Every structure is written in structure tokens, then in C-alpha cells.
Amino acid sequence: IGSEYFSKLVYLCAFLPQGGQSVSSLGANSTGMVQPNLLPNTPRPGYFWFKPDAPLREIFYHDCPEDDVRRAKAMLMPEAMSPMLTPAHLSAARFGRVPRFYIECFQDRAIPLPLQKSMHAASPCASIFA
């Protein structure tokens, strides 16, 4: 999909890779709680799932009511590894032309604030919202 389809990109506490980086490589050196709790090739080859003792509430739902946590946990599904492991292919002519905006989340435990800041510093955004 070309840049002609987008007038702007808004990242809400999201991974913002540079060309050649993958989501997995960005998260590998962070203090986030997701990657240490993943099991690759589970429940089938090519998918990630969480370790049986993964603290899902603490990772994703630490400030949510218990009913919401129960519903959210029930909807979690294994995720394909390929999108997380594939390096981003970006160009100044396409991706670089679309203004980016980043919304930081101070209490996010999947993408900690220092990682959010380093990503939007490396790939400058038109505005940062905190």
C-alpha cells in the first residue's frame, strides 16, 4: 500500500521500526514484559504464545477491572511469528513522506517508555503526545 492512501500515521504506544529493524529486534533489548514471557513455535510452528505462568494481568491489564481482564484474556490468540521477525522495508519516498505522530503511554509494560522514546527519537515524528 502506497503513501498516497495515508495522510498521517498515528502510533499509540506502538513499535516504530526503522528500515531493517523488526519488532522482535526492537523489543529484544527493552525491559518490556512481553518477550521474556513468549514461547516461539507454540502452539504450532510459526506462532508465538505465552508461557503457562506468564503474568498476563501485570503485562497488559495491570490497571483494569477484573471482569475486563477475564474477558481480554479469553480473547488472546497465538500470534504469527513472521510479522514480528520480518525487518521493515521503508523508503523516504513512501514511508518518509507520511507525517508520523506518536502517543506515549507512561505505564505501558509491553513497550516501556524508554523504548517508546528511543523509537520516536530515531524515526522523528511531527508531534509527540504524552
Image (cartoon, helix red, strand yellow):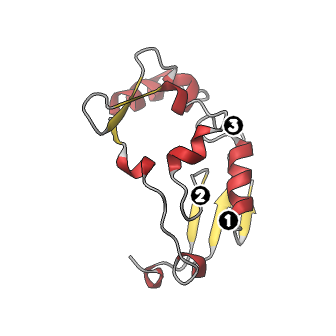
Q: CA distance from mark 1 to mark 2?
A: 7 Å
Give above or below for 42 relative to 52.
below
Q: CA distance from mark 3 to mark 1?
A: 22 Å
- Single out the mark in the foreground, 2 or 3: 2
- Which residue is label 1 attached to? 123
Q: Give the image location of residue 107, x and y in percent.
A: 69, 37
Outermost residue, top direction? 53
Query: Quick check: can you spot residue 61?
Result: no
Q: Residues within 10 Å of mark 1 (few under 14, many from 20)?
A: some
Q: Quadrant of the N terminus?
A: bottom left
Q: Earlier in the sequence, mark 1 or mark 2?
A: 2
Point 26% across, 35% down: residue: 45
In the picture shown, does residue 3 fall above or below 37? below
The image shows residue 83, relative to residue 113, as above or below, that is below
Residue 97: x, y in percent?
Answer: 58, 82
Contact, CB < 8 Å: mark 3 with mark 1?
no
The residue shown at (46%, 14%) is 53
**Residue at 72% across, 43% down:** 113
Residue 107's mark? 3
Residue pointed to by mark 2: 16
Mark closer to the observer (3, 1): 1
Q: Amino acid at mark 3?
A: Gln
Label 2 and label 3: CA atoms lie apart by 18 Å
Is there any visible trace of residue 48 in the rendered image?
Answer: yes
Badge 1 element: loop
In the rendered structure, which amino acid carries the disc numbered 2? Leu
Q: Label 1 is placed on what type of residue?
A: Ser
Closer-to-camera residue (31/72): 31
